[in-house]
Image (cartoon, rainbow, N blue to C red):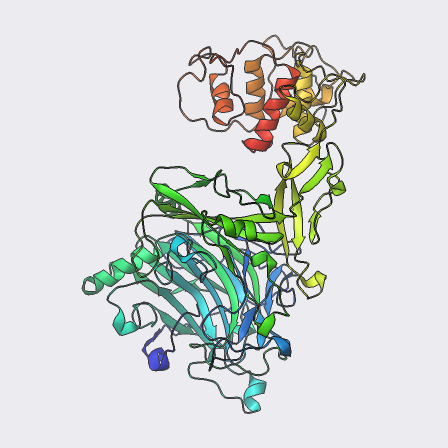
Amino acid sequence: MGRRAFLGAAATGAASAGLIGTVLQPVAAHAAGSATDDSGSSDFRLVWEEQFEGGRLDPEVWEYELGNIRGNSAQHYSSSSDNVRVENGQLVITATDRPAQDRFQPWPGARQVRYNSASVRTHGRRDFLYGKIEVRGRLPRGKGAFPAFWTLGHDFPLDNRINPAQGHTWPSCGEIDIMEIIGAPTARRAAEGEQPSYGQSNRVLWGTPHFYYAKGNEEGNGTYLPYRYGTTTEIAEDFAEAYHVFGINRSPGKIEWTLDGRVYWSVGYSDDPADQPRRDAAQAGLNRPHYLQINLALGGDWAGDVSDHLAEDGTRLEVDWIRFSQTPQQAAQDAAYRSRMPVLQNVRDIAIRQGEAADLIAAVTVDRPGYDVQLSVNDTPMFVNTGAPGGRNEVHLRVRDENDAAAIAALPEGVYSLYYTAIPKGATITGARVPTAPTARARAFLTVLPAAGLSGQHGAAVSSVALPAGHRFRDGSQMLADGSSYLVDFVNPHDPIPEAKRLVHTYRLSSSAISIATKSPFADIKEGHEHFEAVLWAYSAGITKGYPDGTYRPLSPVNRDAMAAFLHRMAGSPAVSLPSTEPFTDIKRGDQHYEAVIWAYQNGITTGYPDGSYRPTQPIARNAMAAFLYRYAGSPAVSASGAPFVDVPAGSAFTREIAWLKQRGITKGWPDGTYRPYGPMNRDATAAFIQRAVVEAGVTFGRG
């Protein structure tokens, strides 16, 4: 979207489906149900949807495109809530007048950038391949209003905000325009004499694919003009009059464009043997994962000039929901493609001290040989919405690759966007080329803390840690402990707009970034004990409380009732519905940990013994503890393997459960290669197992 050269008379070459259909009526809340289509299958199953719930865009999905990016347009993309916000369950993007002191020309002869608007995308967090993407929204009207729902290849380097060597540049990355219109003057402005530029209409919808084709010079570069693979369709009234559902349906052999559930255009990759080389290039560029982007541009080389009244007239784009669904066949095709993609592992938010030439890539790996991991860092979270010299505030690439230690050390305090890309070893993927090998892209945050670092006392509330200006713990009541992490909201303190209108970035701060002074809460376990940090973590997380005499008794075995209590607290101590008939003969109401044992029984974590007993005060064996944890995690699939330890042969009791513990890194066994399955679980080792399960393996109740 917005990368086209000026078309001139090209629009006359586009086919029009002439779709005049019934439209959906605008409503304040989400429309019920899902659009159907006539693409030949009704067996679509919802995979993901965005309902725009809560007070802001989900930071786990969305990021913001900021600045004046491309296309000789008249807008600057802003992060201010004046321009982009969640309102009444909808994403709303609004055009506003840019302050006079911030208006500028990107280059001599370019349009003046006089408006603020917004652009958001799922880049680095969620991408889409085979299936149907539908977006329900109401489009703006007005001269030069240029909204778009579109997709770009997942490894696109963001117009050089990522090192272009680390991705397929445009158009090689592929682009699919789900919806574009080029707004014409409103009735009021037309009556006042405002004239449309060529091709502007509030009723004409464009759907176009873009890709690299080496022999495409007669059409710009084989992607610009819609002579062959793009089209328009026109409806009877302005798109601003009602909500519509705009969609694409992608399969390996074709793409379909839909409006309100009806297919109005289709491009097949084997429909024209005479044009097969071009269609092969299209298939290579478009049959790869794409992220979704939604924006409201204003004018441009293709969209033409803009009205002087777009802000005054309240020009806005409203998005009600987004849905991605697949047929079983598309799901299988999608999975087959992704099985060939590299998977980036251990991508996490990182915190360093200012001046530290940290290795930001050391922990990140790829799940298969033949790939390198590369990184870029830009300053998206440090973007300011006004007050930049010359009026042009932009996002800058700050670190070009993992070898740029000097640039990493020179980063000022603040928060930055960190991008990892998995690329075939020795491959060049940038520039004009047809994509071949799969790649992967992931996004995280890099926080640069003061050179002096952060400090706190173990067991104290995290709110006692003095964070730099703009950073705030999401839950200040959490306790400091090694092996923990904390959500932090960052609002750029250097952005001159009111704080209430600034964008909030949320990152996860590991306790390893904080110098934590340790003071044991127990009289019998001190720093230096083998599992000291794990015990402190379990205590801080409320999983263990110790004994009334102030001891923990680390080398004592864990009884079966206490093991149930540990797991119940891990799950957040949910309420327990007490049974009318006791499931066990040897534990009853009023006994210690009775409710935790009942909870474990009701959730399939324990079954007790064949004689109907639970044996609550009997020490739990190491193999039974493995079974408890495995069932707590929802009994996940386990990769086929032989004996996980020399003393746990295949077919022995709880072999699968012990293998799962080992595969997830929850147990390491003993130095002699044994697990000692029938030995007791000591209390310190139990704390270590639980910490590894939660912190390192990400185990939660019902999911492991």
Quadrant of the snapshot with the C terminus: top right
x and y percentages locating residue 661 in the rendered image: 51, 23
Q: Is residue 598 visible?
A: no
Quadrant of the snapshot with the N terminus: bottom left
Q: Is residue 612 visible?
A: yes
x and y percentages locating residue 370 in the rendered image: 33, 40
> With 112 as the anchor, is 302 left or right in this view?
left
Q: Residue furthest left?
A: 274
Of the pair 119 and 158, the residue shown nearer to us: 158
x and y percentages locating residue 658 in the rendered image: 50, 19
> With 519 as the anchor, is 560 left or right in this view?
left
Of the pair 39 and 378, the residue shown nearer to us: 378
Q: Please, is residue 662 above or below residue 399 in the view?
A: above
Q: Please, is residue 340 above or below residue 21 in the view?
A: above
x and y percentages locating residue 219 in the rendered image: 29, 72
> With 486 as the anchor, is 132 left or right in this view?
left
Q: Residue furthest top?
A: 611
How many numbered marks appear? Answer: 0
Quarter assignment of residue 18 = bottom left
Residue at coordinates 57% horizontally, 86% vertically from top-left? 189
Of the pair 374 and 144, the residue shown nearer to us: 374
Residue at coordinates 34% horizontally, 70% vertically from top-left? 224
Q: Residue furthest right?
A: 549
